[in-house]
Image: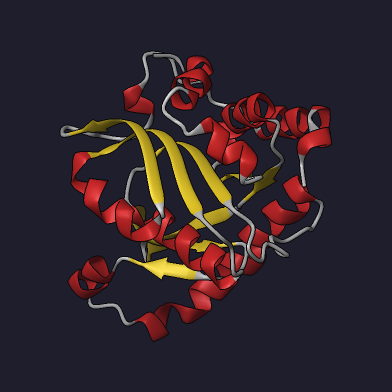
Amino acid sequence: MKTSEVGGVILDILPKNELVEGEFLVVCSNLQAVKVAFEMARELNLKVELFLSKKIYAPKNEECEIGIVGETEEFVLNERLLELFGLAESRLAGQIKEIYEDAVLHKIYKFKKGKILENLAQKNILVVDFGVESGLMSSLLATSLRKLDCGKIYLAAFAAPLELKEELLGFYDRSFVVRYDENFVDVPDCFCEFESLSEEEILSFLEENRDILV
């Protein structure tokens, strides 16, 4: 499976009539998946919004992801890893604030012209991504979107670890995942050809498709 083919495959398992009648908003949670999100939105005649975030890594270990912070300033931490490293959430407060101000806000101004996710009261949401690697992003999205008083929140993705199948039900009202993999490694590993987009390519694509951006 190529990433360029994913949109149609995910669409095949979605309740299209419900999404259209419910005027769902497509929320792309991964800039690398913008082409898929926009393809699906156009097929369903829906609008698109971006949700930007940045991973939080353990101090002095830039390979160990311990959390994630999103554009609405909500953040989620892996409690098991915090305990393992002997880290208190209070100790990470400064690091999280710095990541938000230096990285997340930078992305918001670069890719969304400074527009933070808002005004979604009672709006139905369809979160779109290539896949789910851990429960951190799903937890962050659920927390952020529910605090904005959204309506229904659905997930549409190609792949996820089998061990997360039940956990996802706790984050979303409904989850539509093409493939749950018992031997899941990471999202790129699920594709025979993974198209990685540069920031310039993403910006160009967004500009060309601004007509369906909220």
Measuring from the top left, give residue 169's x and y in whole percent: 31, 54
Is 62 situated left or right of 206 in this image? Answer: left
Question: With respect to residue 105, does 175 lie above or below?
Answer: above
Q: Residue at x 53, y 70 (%)?
A: 74
Residue 183: name its quadrant.
Answer: top left
Residue at image x 60%, y 52%? 52
- Would you say residue 86 is visible in this rendering? yes
Horizontal and vertical percent position of residue 126: 54, 45
Q: How is the image coloured?
A: secondary structure
* Residue 164 visible in the picture: no
- Residue 21's x, y, as percent? 63, 41
**Relative to 72, 61 lies left or right:** left
Q: Quadrant of the N terminus?
A: top left
Horizontal side, residue 6 vs residue 64: left or right: right
Observer-nearest of 138 and 67: 138
Foreground: 77 or 29?
29
Furthest residue toward bottom: 90
| Residue 90 figure quarter | bottom left
Q: Is 126 situated above or below 96?
A: above
At 45% from the left edge and 44% from the top edge, which residue is drawn?
Answer: 155
Residue 59 percent coordinates (x, y)? 37, 67
198 or 175: which is nearer to us? 175
For residue 88, above or below residue 11: below
Number of marks in picture: 0
Please tell me which residue is depicted at 47% across the width and 21% down the height of the picture: 6
Rendering quarter of residue 2: top left
Q: Is residue 158 above or below residue 192?
A: below
